[in-house]
Amino acid sequence: MSSSASSADAGTIPSVSVRNLAKSFGPVRAVQDVSFDVYPGEIFGLLGPNGSGKTTTIRMMLDIFEPDKGTVQVLGGSLDQARKDRIGYLPEDRGLYKDQKLDTVLTYLGRLKGLDEPTVAERLESWLRRLDLWEHREKKVQELSKGMQQKAQVIATLLHDPDLIVVDEPFSGLDPVNTRIIKEVFDEQRAAGKSIIMSTHQMYQVEALCSRIALINQGEVVLYGEVDEIRRRFAGNAVVVEGEGNFEGLGGVVDARQTNGAWHLALSADADPHDLLRTLASREGVRLDRFELAEASLDDIFVSVVQEGDRAFAGAGGSLEPSATENRRA
């Protein structure tokens, strides 16, 4: 996992400070109470199941939606046009002009962000060559593969050298080689002091890149803090089991999957592994060859918190702002 160098140290000014955001669409409360900070030089994971409110939160943060309540501070103040020009946004839905040539579209988007033509031309060639799109620059966007279009979106996001980068499912459509390249690009941006907010369902990418996360469920932050600290807090909420018999349908188990002959069982937040061991030992037709505690992955924690609706771990890393009380306030 990439670590942000002292990104959340006391005295460091956040690049983004979100406090008590709420938003309703008619009778539907999409976001109820969301608070978090993002610091320079970190990749921050904004996570949640479909319909949790994370995309609405991003849109309020970027002044696309106006919140019903709450405040947002971005790059030191309210989001005026000058600050908007310092943001790079990669939405989940591709927003390129499909019937135009690739270099024409990217040049236009760079100019919209205030770059002059020589600067756009120099930066664009560098990015196109690095992401293996130089030979395709005169093709229409619609003629490109999904992976190529995704790489083009990344270029559009970074071309103007933004200070805040917001990416929604950035690895969509990418093969393993290009995924690695884009991960390297994001890590370079982080090392250069940029702030990156990444929203994705790919928990292994979050574990590889993010230093801190906020998990939103049903419009509220239910988990917030440093990834390593959160995983320590959930230690014992996963076990590995080997043997013969049926290891499915066990009480307290929220997810069970078998890999290379071993069962990985993710437990609910209030489950006791010792109770599970006693249940298995007394279960007819089961023979245990191995039973050991495993370090819970973010996948396990995500499933556990979302499925159980557990709020006991809200505000993980209690010394970080916002406090657990703020995160739970309705």
Image (tube, helix red, strand yellow):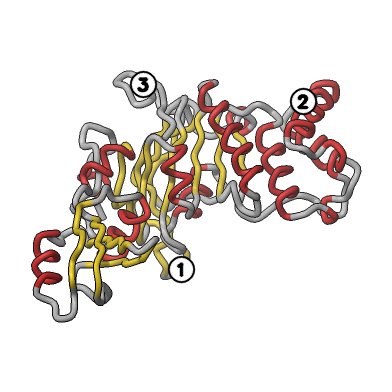
Q: Which residue is mark 1?
A: 26
Residue 77: horizontal and vertical position, in percent? 47, 28
Q: Earlier in the sequence, mark 1 or mark 2?
A: 1
In this rendering, which labeled residue sits more in front, label 3 or label 1? 3
Q: CA distance from mark 3 to mark 2?
A: 30 Å
Q: Is residue 169 above or below residue 42?
A: below
Q: Which residue is mark 3?
A: 6
Q: Within 10 Å of the Cα at label 1, are there few (<14), some (14-19), or many (20+) other Cα atoms?
A: few
Q: Amino acid at mark 2?
A: Arg
Q: Is residue 181 above or below residue 257?
A: above
Kindly state the secondary structure of the residue where label 1 is placed: loop
Q: Amino acid at mark 1?
A: Gly
Number of callouts in the render?
3
- Is 49 left or right of 269, judged from the image as shown? right
Q: Earlier in the sequence, mark 3 or mark 1?
A: 3
Q: Which residue is mark 2?
A: 123
Q: Amino acid at mark 3?
A: Ser
- Is 261 left or right of 318, judged from the image as shown? right
Residue at image location 15% in from the left, 62% down from the top: 271
Q: Within 10 Å of the Cα at label 3, are there few (<14), some (14-19), or many (20+) other Cα atoms?
A: few
Residue 203: horizontal and vertical position, in percent? 43, 50
Q: Earlier in the sequence, mark 3 or mark 2?
A: 3
Residue at image location 18% in from the left, 53% down from the top: 312
Residue placed most toward the observer, 142 or 289:
289
Residue placed most toward the observer, 42 or 89:
42
Residue at image location 47% in from the left, 25% down from the top: 41
Q: Within 10 Å of the Cα at label 2, are there few (<14), some (14-19), or many (20+) other Cα atoms?
A: some
